[in-house]
Amino acid sequence: MARSTGWVTGRRVLDAFLGAVIVASGAVGVLASSSSATATSSPNTGTVTRGTVQATESTSGTVVAAATYSLGFPTAGTVAAIDVSVGQQVAQGQVLATMSPTAAQSALTVAQDNLTAAQDRLAQDEQGGATPAQGSARSPSTEATTTTLPNPATIAADEAVVVAEEQAVNTAQQVLSGTTLVAPAAGTITAINAQVGQTIGAGGNSTGAKSSGGAATASGSLAGAGSAKSSAVGVSSAGDVMTLTDLSQLDVTCDVAEANIGAIFQGQPATVSLNALPGHEFAATVASVAQIGTTSGSVVTFPVTLALQHPTSAVKPGMSATVTIVTSSVDNVLAVPSSAVHGTGKMGTVTVRSAKGVDSRVTVVIGLAGTSTTAVYGDLVVGETVILPSVSISAPVTGAITRRAARTLGGLPGGLGGHVGRSGGGKLGRRG
């Protein structure tokens, strides 16, 4: 009788435990199902707006001065004076430096004297001359003269000498004028590479120690001796006495990949942000697009120059920049987040959610795909909610009991369960 009572008691305990496990399994399953449903039934949403959609091309670049002049004396000599300092703003035609004029002045004096002598000789030969004639036998004491006509060959030779001496005087005058270095344009002195007393060669090539400082690449000629104009900062060439930079106009140079250069044209608007000035954006315009690309390894890019509009004094040549060029733009159009549009080509759909939570698909014509939004044409209203792709969230498998849940729900009777298995369960097995 005692054995029968123990078996019944064990059976009841086992049934109670199994019931608790079933209830727990259901509870965990419901929680898992609820979590999974929440992850899939709450997609991201966006809003239909009306405005401007823009497609852009972004790349990195560098701020440069629009015009940089490398200046030097056109003749060799010794620097006598430097009349400016680095950072000084100068006007066009202002004297920047001078060279000792003694040798140049002496050369000019000699050339002028030679020209005067040649001109006197030409004038004399053009007038002809009188020579004594032979006296007659009857009157040997009677003196007579003979007039000599000008010799064309002699005059031509004299004229050639005069022309050569005139050229020598002009050259000497240019050399003397070249001992004074003047600003070819208004700008700021950004480097001085010579010092008083230094002997330099023609074109600014130094034969003595040079002071520190950089100069610009001399590419192309400029009216005026001893200067060269450049459109970018680079390595100095011959005329390196000092560098004059026009900071009134700053540009940004950048490279655009060959796959995207077809969308870049002169005059396109752009924005420029500088690493050195976070939070500031500057308007710019595409000024030029190179017609010949450059190759680095297997990558081909095309240089593009943008003109900055109204840069502040804080913007300096050499600063690194991020350039965003507007390649296409449409105004006053309906726009939705680009991820809300489904379809390829010109036709697509947008899923709209009503105020009551009902979703419906609307067919649209796909317009310009911008950086973050896409222009669409269809039966949409500004302010409507559109459905974006859901974010995938992992959830427990429905109906499964996690180890933590099993420990929480079944851990307490675990000893009891094991006891039942050993006593009642074994008895059930034997009984069965």
Image (tube, rainbow, N blue to C red):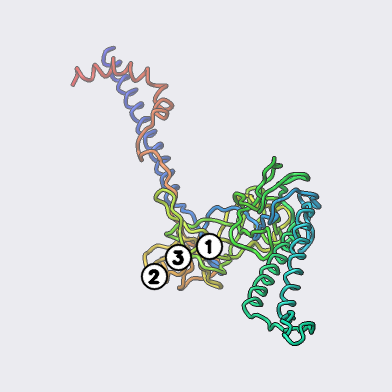
Would residue 24 appear left or right of 356 to someone viewing this image? Answer: left
Neighbor class of circle 3 (other Cα within 10 Å; few <14, some 14-19, many 20+) is few
In the rendered view of the protein, which quadrant contains the N terminus? top left
Kindly identify the residue that appears in the image at 74 percent across and 83 percent down.
135
**Where does residue 269 sit, x and y in percent of width and height?**
58, 66
| Eye-nearest disc, 3 or 2 | 3
Marks 3 and 1, Cα distance to the nearest angstrom? 33 Å
**Where does residue 102 sit, x and y in percent of width and height?**
79, 53
- The disc, 1 or 2, on the residue closer to the chain's N-terminal end is 1
Marks 3 and 2, Cα distance to the nearest angstrom? 22 Å
Q: CB under 8 Å between callouts 3 and 1?
A: no
Residue that mark 1 sits on: 47
Q: Quadrant of the rendered structure where residue 157 is?
A: bottom right
Task: Please give the label number shown on residue 262.
Answer: 3
Q: Quadrant of the rendered structure where residue 287 is?
A: bottom right
- The disc, 3 or 2, on the residue closer to the chain's N-terminal end is 3
Q: Nearer the viewer, residue 301 or 229?
A: 229
The local secondary structure at tag 2 comes to loop
The local secondary structure at tag 3 comes to helix
Neighbor class of circle 1 (other Cα within 10 Å; few <14, some 14-19, many 20+) is some
Task: Please give the label number shown on residue 371.
Answer: none
Q: Nearer the viewer, residue 228 or 340?
A: 228
Name the amino acid type tagged 3: Gly
Task: Please give the label number shown on residue 346.
Answer: 2
Q: CB under 8 Å between callouts 3 and 2?
A: no
| Eye-nearest disc, 3 or 1 | 3
